[in-house]
Image (spheres, rainbow, N blue to C red):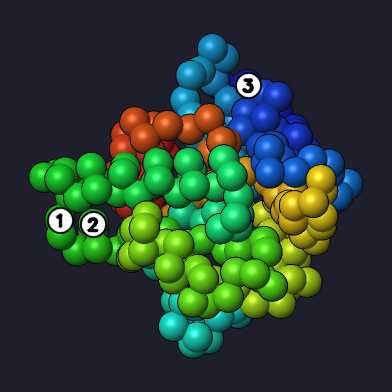
Amino acid sequence: MRKKKTLAAAALLATAVLTLSACGSGDSGDRPVVQVSAENGSDKAGTVLDQPFEKPDLVLTDTHGKKYDLRSETKGKPTLIYFGYTHCPDVCPLTMNNLAVAKKEVEKNKQLTQAQKDSLRIVFVTTDPERDTPSALDKWLKGIDPEVVGLTGDFATIQAGARALGISIEPPRKENGKIVSTHGTQVIAFSPKTDGGYVVYGKDATVDDYTKDIPKIIKGENP
């Protein structure tokens, strides 16, 4: 039996997975309410949403300096989206490396066709667009996985797109002489069947968690 819970998306980590990054602290106060299904005693890393998020209408700039329309470019493709920044000292590189390693492991999966494996999209959206230019994103992502889509653009546009997914981000600010960016740490998985954001992962999700779940996400199944 599954027990349904109504939770604020920006506060799910206490019982599921949403939080703000150690790169900063605080909360915007924008907390859209979502329905989630959680199994009692479940140790699953991903939380399946009863009411999936609509994919944000985000048009940004990719690492080649070209316009990238998130909805059209990822339509019908299994997609993992993460908001962070390249100067992040901890959770951002860890999360992106976990996804990159898991992707390589999934590529060895003989139960998936090559077309299915090639359909996976991992998208990194910067929360620090002033410093994360297309070239800066390109250089950083090449050290992780050059196939990851890196996006930058106007901060207000990025913030609105993140908020549509229950992710709080704040404008970069100086703290102890350093520029920090406060942002949610969740990874949102979008189904290739519905294009809805239906699974949410927090910063504690491991390589093994993603390796186990991504094949199901590629098929549009619940992990």
Residue 99 position in % (x across, y down):
39, 46
Q: Quadrant of residue 17?
A: top right
Q: Is 210 positioned to the left or the right of 173 in the image?
A: left
Q: Amino acid at mark 3?
A: Lys
Q: Is 67 positioned to the left or the right of 144 in the image?
A: right
Q: Residue visible at 43% across and 68% down? A: 139
Q: Are marks 1 and 2 in contact (CB under 8 Å)?
A: yes
Q: Amino acid at mark 1?
A: Thr
Which residue is disc 2 drawn over?
A: 117
Which residue is disc 3 drawn over?
A: 3
Q: Residue visible at 82% across and 57% down? A: 173
Q: Secondary structure at mark 3?
A: strand
Residue 90 appears in the figure = yes
Residue 45 position in % (x across, y down):
48, 29
Quick one: 121 or 140, which is closer to the camera? 140
Q: Are marks 2 and 3 in contact (CB under 8 Å)?
A: no
Residue 53 position in % (x across, y down):
62, 54
Q: Are marks 3 and 1 in contact (CB under 8 Å)?
A: no
**Label 3 or label 1, whichever comes before in sequence order:** 3
Circle 1 packing at 10 Å, graded few (<14), some (14-19), many (20+), is few
Which residue is disc 1 drawn over?
A: 113
Q: Secondary structure at mark 1?
A: loop
